[in-house]
Every structure is written in C-alpha cells, then in structure tokens.
Image (spheres, rainbow, N blue to C red):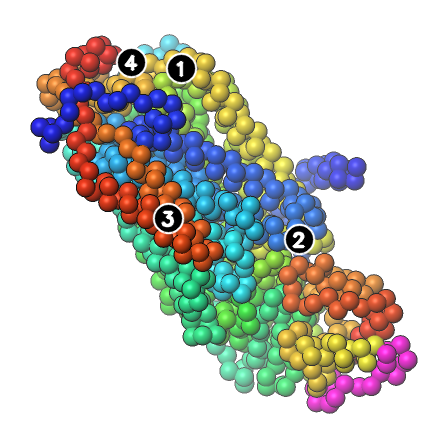
Amino acid sequence: MKGWQQFWRQLSLFGLLALVLTGCGKDELSALKPSGPVAAMQYDLMKLSSAIMIGVFIVVMLIFTYVLIRYRKRPGQQGIPKQVEGNHALEILWTVIPFLLLIVMAVPTVTTGFALHEEYPKEEALQVKVTAHQFWWEFEYPDLGVATAQDLVLPVGKKVQFHLTSADVMHAFWIPALGGKIDTNPGQENKMWLQADKTGIFYGKCAELCGASHALMDFKVEVMDQAAFDKWIDGMKGVQSKDPAVATSPGAAQGQEIFNKSCLGCHAVAGKGGKLGPNLTNFADRERVAGILEHTPENVAKWLKDPQKEKTGNNMPNLNLDDAQVKALVEYMSTLSVK
Amino acid sequence: MSAHASHAPAPKRSGLWDWLTTVDHKKIAILYLIAGGIFFLAGGFEALLIRLQLMYPESQVVGAGLFNELITMHGTTMIFLAVMPVIFALMNAVVPLQIGARDVAFPFVNALGFWLFFFGGLLLNTSWFLGGAPDAGWTSYTTLALNQYSGRGVDFYVLGLQIAGLGTLIGGINFLVTIINMRAPGMTFMRMPMFTWASFVTSGLILFAFPAITVGLVLLMFDRLFGGNFFNPDAGGNVIIWEHLFWIFGHPEVYILILPAFGIISEVVSTFSKKRLFGYSSMVFATALIGFLGFMVWAHHMFTTGLGAIANTLFGLATMLIAVPTGIKIFNWLLTMWGGQITFPTANLWAVGFIPTFTIGGMTGVMLAVPPADYQYHDSYFVVAHFHYVIVGGLVSGLFAGLYYWWPKMFGKMLNEKLGKWNFWTFFIGFHLTFFPQHFLGLMGMPRRVYTFLKGQDLDVGNFISTIGVFGMTIGTILFLVNVVVSAKGKRAVADPWDGRTLEWTIPSPPPEYNFAQTPLVRGLDAFWIEKMAGNKGMTPAEPLGDIHMPSPSFLPFLMSVGLFIAGYGFMYHNYVVVVIGLLVTFGCMFARSVKDDPGYHIHEDEIEEKGVKA
C-alpha cells in the first residue's frame, strides 16, 4: 500500500528531525526566515524571548535533575526529612529575578510594538486595500486605480500600508516571511504595514478559521523591483481603463462568449464585470489557480468543471459546463495577461 | 431543624435509582468522573481523527467540512465536558474530606450541577446525529458562527454550553460556600490544604467568569434563533464584542482549569517527598494572584484583532506579570522535593513529569505575551502547541496524578502500579512527540485549524511526527482504562496508603457516607501529619459521637435538567410547545422543591459505632 511506503519513508526521515527543525522551513513561508524589516523585528523579539526562556528552563532543569537524583529515597533510608516551612531569601530571589528578566523583555516589546503600529501616508508608502472573501483575497491599489486578486504584487524595498477588511466572515492576513498577521473584520478597517527586502515569491495564508476551505485560502506575494512594478501597474491600468480586449483565436473567442455570458457577472476582466469573485484581469500571469493548484490548463479545467470539489464551500456554483465549453474557456482565460 | 428530621434510616435505594437520586458528594464525584471520562474519550477520538487527517499533506481521511466539526467538538468537548467535570470530580471527592466536612454546603445543588452539565453535554453531542456538529471553532467567532455562514450545529453549541455552564456556575458557588462555611474546627484559611485553596480560588473564578460567557451565549442565541443583530455588521452589529465576551470568560477559564492542577501537584509532591509544602503562604498568595491577574489579560487572545498599540502593549505586559507567581510555584515545588525522601509511585511520576512540561508551556506563554512577536505566533500551530502543553501536559498530567493519588480514597481499590507506569511513559512520550514539533510547524508558517496542508511547504515531517505521537497518547489512555478494570479486582486500599498528610487519609477508603464519624479538631497545616508526628493514632475529635444528620436523596435535580434539555430542542427547532413542556418540567420541579419540606434523615449513633470507629 502506498500509505505504508510513505509511512516508512517518513519514519526514516525521523533522524533528520533535528536538522529540519533548525533548518526552519521554506524561505518563501517561514517566519524564521524574515525577508523584511517587520518580520526581522519580530524575529529579533522571538530570539530574545526564547533565549531568556531557555535560560530559565535550563536553571529549572538543573535544579530538577539534581533534586531527583540526590533526594530520591534510598533503600533502607530511615527517619523523617526536616520539615522546612520556607526560606524568605530564596522566595524573594525567585520573585525578583523573573521580574527583572521580564523588564528586559518588556522594553523592546513596547518599542517594537509602537513601531509596528506606525501608519504611513501615501507619500511614504504604497497604499493597498485588502478585502478578504470566503476563500480568496481581493487587492486594490486605490491611488493607482488598479485592482487584482490572489496574487499581491509589491515593489521591493518600499513600505506598504495595508488597509484591511472583510466582505463576509473574519479572516486573518498573514505573510509569515514578511511579518505577522492581522485580522480582517467585517464592518471595520484594520491597518498594518509591511516591507519586502527581497524580490521573489512569498506565500500568504488566511490564519483565522473562516469556513470549510479555510486551509485553502492561500495567496501569493510577488515582489519585484520598482521598475518592473511600475511596468506591471501601467499594464494593469492600461487594460483596466478599457473594455476587455476581443479574443482573436477562434477557440478563445468562443471562450470569451461563454465567459461574458456566465462569468462576467461575478468576475471582472479589464474594465468590466462584477466584484463577487476574484478579478481575473491578469489571470494567466498568476502563480496558482484558485490560490492552491499549480497553474496548468488541466487544473484550470478541473476547477471550472467542479469548483466545489477543489475548494469546498466556496461561493462559485458549478456551471455544468461540457468539455468543449471548458476547453474554450481555458483557452480564453490563458489570454488574460498583462505581461 | 433536627426536630423535624425523621430518625428512621433512609429508604434503601439500590442500583441505577441510587445513582440518579444521590446527593452524596462522593457519588457525585464518581458520576462526574464517569461522564467526564466518556466525553474525554469522545474528544480524544476526535483528536485522533484530526491528526490522522493531518498525517500526510493533501490527504482526504475526513473532508473539509467534517474536519471543522471535529476541531470544534474536540475543543469544546475537552474544555467544557472532559477536563472541567474531571476537575469537579476531584473537587467533589476530596475538598469536603480535606476540610473535615460531611458533605458540601448544598448537596441538592451539587447533584443539580452535575445533571445540568451532563444534559448540556449530551445535547451538544446529539448534534452529530441531528444535521451536523458545530463547525465554527470552540471559540465560535462571529460572523462565522451566525446563521448565514454556519449550520444548525452552532445552535447546539449555544444551548448545550448554556445548560452545561449553569451547572458549572452553581457548582462553583457551592464550593465557595462549602469552603468558607464548612471547615472543621481549627481549620483556618491558612491551614487549608493546597488543593482546597486551589479549588476555592477556581470556584471564585467560575463565579465571575461564567456570567460573561452566559451573556455572550444569550446574545448569540438571539442572533441565531430570534433574528437579533448584535454581531451582524450589516445591521450595525459589532463582531468584536463576541471576542471580548468570550475571552473575558475564556482566559479566566484557563486558570479555572490549571489552578486545581497546581493544587494536586502541591499535594502529591509534598506527600511523596515526605516534606511539608515549601513556602505554603507564598503558594497561597501566588494562587490568589494568578486568579486575580487572570481577569486582567483576556485581550492577549486578541492581539491581532486590531485593538491598537496601546491596548496590545498593556495587555501584553500584564500577561507577562503572571509569569512571576507561576515561577514562584515551580521553584516552591522543586524546593519541596529538595532534602526530601522522594518515592515514585505513578501519582508522583505524573506530578514530577508535570514540572518540566508545564514549565515549557508557561515559557511559550510568556513568549506569546510579547504582542509584536505574537503577530507571528497567533492562530498558528505555535499556539496549538502552547495551549496543549498547558492543558494536556499540565492539566491532564495533574488530573492523572490526582486520580492515581486519590483513586484509593474514591473507590477503595489501588490502581495497578505497573500498568500505571506504562500508562505514564507512553502518554508522556507520546505527548511530547505530538506537540513539541508543532511549535516549529507554527513558526514555519502553518496556521491552526487547517484541514490540510499543501505539498512543498516543508511541513510534512513535523506533521507526520506529530501524528505518530498521538498513538503513544492513545495507548496511554487505553492502558489507564485497562488499569481501572484490573483494579476493580485488585488490592483493597487501606485508609492511608501513601502516608498522607491531610484529613482525607484519616478516614476509611472509601469513606462512609457521613465521612467523619466525629468532626476532627485541626491543629495546623497538614493536620494528619501533625498528629502522626505527635504519636497519635488519629485525629482528636472536636465533638462527641452523636446522630448524624444527612440530606435526603432526590430525583428532582435529574428532572430539572431533563426539562432544560427538552426545552433546548424546542428553542432550536422553534417549537414552542416543546419549550413550554420542558420549562414546565423544570419550573415544576423547582416549585416542588420549594414547597416540599425536606427534613433529611439521621444516621444513628449505634450504627456509626458499629462500622465507623474502628477504622
């Protein structure tokens, strides 16, 4: 059975545990591999607090081990141990020392805490509006007039001020490698800033239970240099200021016809369409299909055939498309690019 | 009072009827233990399924929807229906004995508390068969927990917890009154055993914390069943209010759970080191301080809610402060063992194992109290690891220690030591294997409450190891059940099997229904130990031998709870005839209880001399 094969293979990986745990996960995902100032500050606090705590733990364990070895009852041991009531000096000692250790932790806690809650105006930071939906992410650049979904595109080395809310239930916006999370609350706006210091792809997650497919509410962050970012924005703006381009190939044209009839009500393409589902203007450029599946024509088709199977409980109905329709739609959607 | 009381012995009741009508704290303790144990097994089975689903990436052992039902029911069951009742089992079994009382202050209310909890829990669990269990997490955050986004299951959560919570609340009040009023002569507050102190503070916390969840559940009930809009932002409601109400209850709840474990560890470590508890008064002070601070820190569960830098920082610093009294406790336990003659029966293995495990849980707790870092930990597997270290590694270890320690007193039988040691080691190793890697999984970017994780995120090995560990805990739990069965035919327990220090060890195992033939006179902390050291065989009685007044058994607590159970279904299905029937049963019983004079009965002096005194 495949399961058992996997079982033994993973069991042999057991020895690698220590290695993996110090390896600390994937660059694109792990909070232990910070790629921006916010994550770095948080990582520093983690290191400081765990160092102090491990120190305390070592002291406790030394006393613990000594006591268990030294004072275990030996065979034939007689008499009654001395009944000690307490010791004021010792008790004061282990009240005061932890208190001092806490002060060491408290100072950077306060300074970092306030630094992370700074709010940057649009002169200093790129403003991004995040709206969470079951189970996808909507990203708008209000000052630039651009809207996208699922793939958040950011310039490297520049502060980004997020304004976050939710369209339905509570979600939480988390890009571990760039910084900690914040909830997106329906009916309210939260603010948070982040900055990416490396170009590349980072993984984003929803961290607040939000329904059946909470686990699959992933998004990607694509960090590019400023020039590439400006070009991307120009591309998006150029497309989104107009009606959708008319598809040229016959397959895609047929797909566009189906799309306009069945999909445009919820999904926007270029300057047209609804906002109930993810904006698909640059669908073909995205890392993943629906945030989770590898971006291949087969996976796009798989999703179109039965969206509920890939992401239980999402709001996209099964459109009961036949194979030919799916094929045409996939062809059309592969033309939705700004690159 | 005694003028009305009949001198005839109580009508003999046997079998099931006896258990349904009992108001004896020792029997109620056993009821709590059985019911809590069954719910513990249910919650454990849910945990097993959760871990099997997460053993491999992208697996489909249970589906997305069912997984959310499992995590919700696992959390809710374990907190409200498993560990709380087992704590109440030990409090019922031990506290009256430790303070030299014949029963709790309100035996009738005690029975009512149990049956309310039981039927509330039953109501909640019937959701599995009536359209699906609640699936919005044990915290049931709105708006996910509102009608538009979740099924009928959450109605079961609301009404089940409301009924069970009533039981807990009146149980807490009962213990407060008992401990304040029913201590034996000489048992001043500062002579009370540590477990009694912990139960006292825990009961106080229950009194102040449970009303918050009651209010929250009422609001949620109105939103879900009667079209209210407290939490609906589209109609001007506010989703954050639920979070506050839940955690104003929820954080003290953590201390409601852990303080009794602290108490148990204090008793067990002291007994098996043959030393009095080091720094008793600082232990009492630390317990009270933890209870007090426990109410000041609820918003540390909400650092990512968006409360702002000032609120987060203040709640963070307040949370850190709790480390100080907790540290005092850990060092006091170590110094209690220092210079002692430590033996390691299973009870003490659990207690000794508790110390490093709980220390780790406490340390990650301090780390979580740093708000900026918590933005990374929050709602990740790091938090899952943290609270399981506290609640399983801490509390469940404490409960096992308490069960092995007091089992002889509760049942009159010794648990098997060999099985006990296997029980400990398999559970202990399995526990660390399960939860230690989860710290790293969280830091490596795994959110909690995910029904699966995708391949290629370096999360596979940690999850696999974590699931392997669960098998150890499963085996440990099964061994305990085997031990319980085996012990039924095992060695009879003597009155004082562990060379105990407190009053419960001065009376036979199991104790007679009146506990103490004569109320003992307490001459200091560790009352029994003092007498032993003075060369006395037992306690000096504080009263002459005489007739003992006992409360009558009653079927009314059971009926009252059944009434609310029935009304609960009526509310959920909007069938107001059923509601009225259910409430009529409950209020009818309350009326009957109010108008019917219940004089109790007496156990005659001769009968006591016959069986009690020679023990």
Chain of the residue under the numbered disc 1 shown in the image:
A
Marker disc for residue B453: 2
Disc 3 and disc 2 on one polypeptide chain:
yes
Disc 2 and disc 1 on one polypeptide chain:
no
Q: Is residue B168 above or below residue B511?
A: below
Q: What residue is shown at x 44% (from left), y 23% (from top)?
A: B346
CA distance for labels 3 and 1? 63 Å
Q: What residue is shown at x 60% (from left), y 69% (from top)?
A: A133
CA distance for labels 3 and 4? 63 Å
Q: Is residue B469 left or right of residue B612?
A: right
Which residue bears the numbered disc 4? Answer: A79
> For the residue marked with disc 3, what is the amino acid?
Gly
Q: Is residue B308 above or below residue B477?
A: below
Q: Secondary structure at mark 1?
A: loop
Marker disc for residue B582: 3
Classify mark 1: residues with Cα within 10 Å, few (<14), some (14-19) or many (20+): few
Classify mark 4: residues with Cα within 10 Å, few (<14), some (14-19) or many (20+): few
Is there CB contact under 8 Å for labels 3 and 1? no
Q: What residue is shown at x 10% (from left), y 21% (from top)?
A: B543
CA distance for labels 2 and 1? 52 Å
Marker disc for residue B54: none
Chain of the residue under the numbered disc 2 shown in the image:
B
Image: magenta residue range: A234-254
Chain of the residue under the numbered disc 3 shown in the image:
B
Asked if one can make out residue A79 in the rendered structure from this viewpoint, the answer is yes
